[in-house]
Amino acid sequence: MQRLDKAILATHPGFSRSRIEGLVKAGFVTVNGALAGKTGMKVSDDDEIEVEVPSPVPAVPQPENIPLSIVYEDADIIVVDKAPGMVVHPAPGHFTGTLVNALLHHCPDLGGIGGVARPGIVHRLDQDTSGLIVAAKTQTAMDGLQKAFASHCAVEKIYVAICHGRPGLDSGRIENMIGRHPVDRKRMAIVEGRGKRAVTNWRVLGANGPVCAVECRIETGRTHQIRVHMASLGCPVAGDKIYGKSALDKRLEPVPARQMLHARRLVLYHPARNEKMVFEAPVPDDMLAYCGEFL
């Protein structure tokens, strides 16, 4: 028996231990067909270990002339209503066509702000989540916005979601810890002791047959937070291919083509003028089709 990381080093001598740990955490390593839980797990000579090496991400994203729905822009910041399907920054499998590529074309001086790989990016939205996202156009703005988002009190983020079923109450507050799923490293989960604090305040806006419209005000911004929290209530976001229920999706008309989640309202203080700013993005038509009268 030996540690998994040592077994991988034997077949991939060019890998560092941090590289191996990153691959395991990202879900690129399996042992006998199951995702590896941690680098220190014990494996035997008979175990079948598979390592998927993702394609490298180009060090410097390139500008691309991609249309953007710009809600607000000045010399310091730009606020965009991101379309569903657009990835925020380059990553394995998505080297082009991202919000970063579009921003680099629209803002030629953006390169290097906050780092060359994700210039201007302060926070993220999942690929299939639509709505408001702010980017910094100067390093001063980047520093100020990063501090504000990290504080979890100087920024207000409100989302709307179409969810299956309906919670037992009309509103509530979820506070727990969210971290990587102990088995499926591509998922997040409610965990104890080893995650990060996650807080979602939710209220039902109205119901229409098998689905309801829910408003979620998040005090923290953890990966997949709303999707995990709504699923924990037994009301997964419609169209969510990771935490949802495909059988329920297939019963809807139309069948959702993506997760029905939209960042509708963003409130922040301008990083240069310290002026309170409120932005809103209309709910997309694909979500209005289910509960339009409540949105």
Image: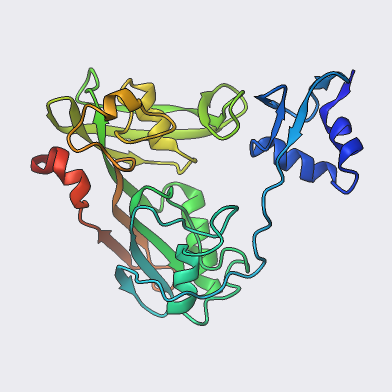
* 66 up-or-down from 248: above or below: below
Q: How many marks?
A: 0
Residue 162 lies in quadrant: top left
Asked if one can make out residue 46 in the rendered structure from this viewpoint, the answer is: yes
222 with respect to 18 (left or right): left
Q: Nearer the viewer, residue 84 or 171?
A: 84
Where does residue 125 sit, x and y in percent of width and height? 42, 51
**128 or 152: nearer the viewer:** 128
Q: Position of residue 187 (x, y in %)?
A: 53, 32
Seen from the viewer's position, the closer of residues 295 and 2 is 2
Apparent side of residue 201 relative to residue 35 in the rendered image (left or right): left
Q: Which residue lies furthest to the left in this view?
A: 293
The residue depicted at 39 percent of the width and 22 percent of the height is 232
Residue 137 seen by the camera: no
What quarter of the picture does the C terminus occupy? Answer: top left
Q: Quadrant of residue 55?
A: bottom right
Q: What is the image's colouring?
A: rainbow
Which residue is located at x 42 percent, y 30 percent? Answer: 228
How far from the left and from the top, in percent, is residue 79? 36, 66
Which percent across, then down, holds residue 1? 90, 17
Residue 262 in the figure: left or right of residue 46 = left
